[in-house]
Image (spheres, coloured by chain):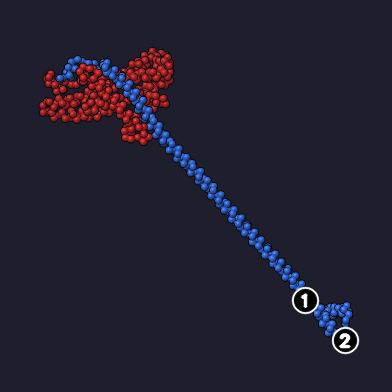
Chain colours: A blue, B red
Amino acid sequence: MSFRTSAAETAVNPLIPHTAELIVGTIAFALLFLVLRSKVVPMFEKAFAARTEAIQGGMEKAEKAQHAAEVALEQYTAQLSEARGEAQQIREEARVQGAAIIEDLRSKAQEEAARITTAATASIEAERQQAITSLRNEVGSLATELASKIVGEALDDQVRQSRIVDRFLDDMEKSK
Amino acid sequence: MRKFAFSESGEGFVPPSTADFNLPPVFADNEFTTKPILLVIFSVVLISVFFIIASRKALVVPNKLQFAGESVYAFVRNGIGQEIIGHEFMRFVPFLFTLFTFILTNNVFGIVPLLQFPAMSHVSFPYVLAIFTFIVFHWVGIKKQGLGKYLKGIAFMPGVPKFVYILLTPIEIATFFIVRPLTLSLRLFANMFAGHLLLLVFILGGEHMLQGGIGLKLIAPFAFAFGIGMTFFEFMVQCLQAYIFTLLTALFIAGALADEH
């Protein structure tokens, strides 16, 4: 069969459309358009939108994380300086307290020392007085006795006796 | 088959002609079963299946198939739609996408082994596509600006001295209603027609030379080699024509959307 030569015999103008081809072409194109519009384009758009969202979401997430980190850092820095300040304050307080305690103890010790000194002085004075008194009595009677014996004069009279003793002692003190 | 053509007539080489494009129906005399019609139907099935499978999962990180489909889609969507039409482009992306894939697939069928026939070399299909484009861009313009304002904008281009309208109005009307759809369809048709004819000349010519004397037999491989080279060239033309048709459609739509022409 040689369709080519047979076809060549019937000269066909290539610009004249065929009815069958027009019909099939229209239906085929319309069908393809409907399929692509309903099935393909929305899916590709969905993928594009999801991709854009994923990228934007990731960026937002990173930004958020960075912000949170900055806030945490600020918080830590603030806490650290606060703690430093607190430590400084505590140290200062301790120093003041220590000084106060030392001062307190010192004054207490001084007081105690003064008290002890006073008590000792008082007791010494008392003993001295006592010694003086007893000594005066004894020395008086001894001297009287001795003098009476020497001068032969009885010095019974109590008043007289003590006046003599006093005078004697006064003389002794003066002669010192 | 070619062999019979000249051996029967005995008149030597008969160059391929327009008659070579009129293939008989595959099944009996049903004119809906010619090669170009079956190829167009096959292309619709092929494109639909490919893009449905490619886009079905709509993954954020695409697999190879989705990436391939997405690349074509993004090329039309961003490279043609967004670039030319502007902020309203999304409404027209399905139409532009269909145009591009439909034309590209049917064009490339021209060099796919066994198929080897560009359906767009039958002028009916470019006519159909140009009519769709014609309807879409006029409909867009009428809907956007109103029928009266739209027609007035076409017939009486603003900012032109009145006496120029004597010349300009017929030209503008002819441009918008006759020249645009006609050039759009004929450009595609003629490119595919001529390209296919060129391949026929080299390959059938080479085949004919193989039947001839020893000298012709030696030259025949060069004809085939040139035919193969032209096949690559044809591939470029086929892609380019699909791009141009879609691009011009987008330009027409953008023009109809703009208030001032």
Identify the mark at residue A131; answer none if there is no mark.
1
Q: Secondary structure at mark 1?
A: helix
| Disc on the earlier residue, 1 or 2 | 1
For badge 2, the amino acid type reads Gly
Q: Quadrant of residue A57?
A: top left
Q: Amino acid at mark 1?
A: Ala
**Number of residues whose C-alpha sits closer than 10 Å to that of mark 2, classed few (under 14), some (14–19) or many (20 or more):** few
Q: Is residue B112 left or right of residue A152?
A: left
What residue sits right under mark 2 in the picture? A152
Q: Nearer the viewer, residue B92 or A119?
A: A119
How many residues crowd around disc 1 within 10 Å: few (fewer than 14), some, or many (20 or more)?
A: few
Say if A53 sits above or below A149 in the image.
Answer: above
Q: Please give the name of the residue rendered at 88% of the width and 84% of the height, measured from the top-left corner.
A: A154
The structure residue drawn at horizontal position 32% and vertical position 30%, both measured from the top left corner, is B53
The quarter in which the C terminus of chain A is drawn is bottom right
Q: Are marks 1 and 2 in contact (CB under 8 Å)?
A: no
Quarter occupied by residue B140: top left
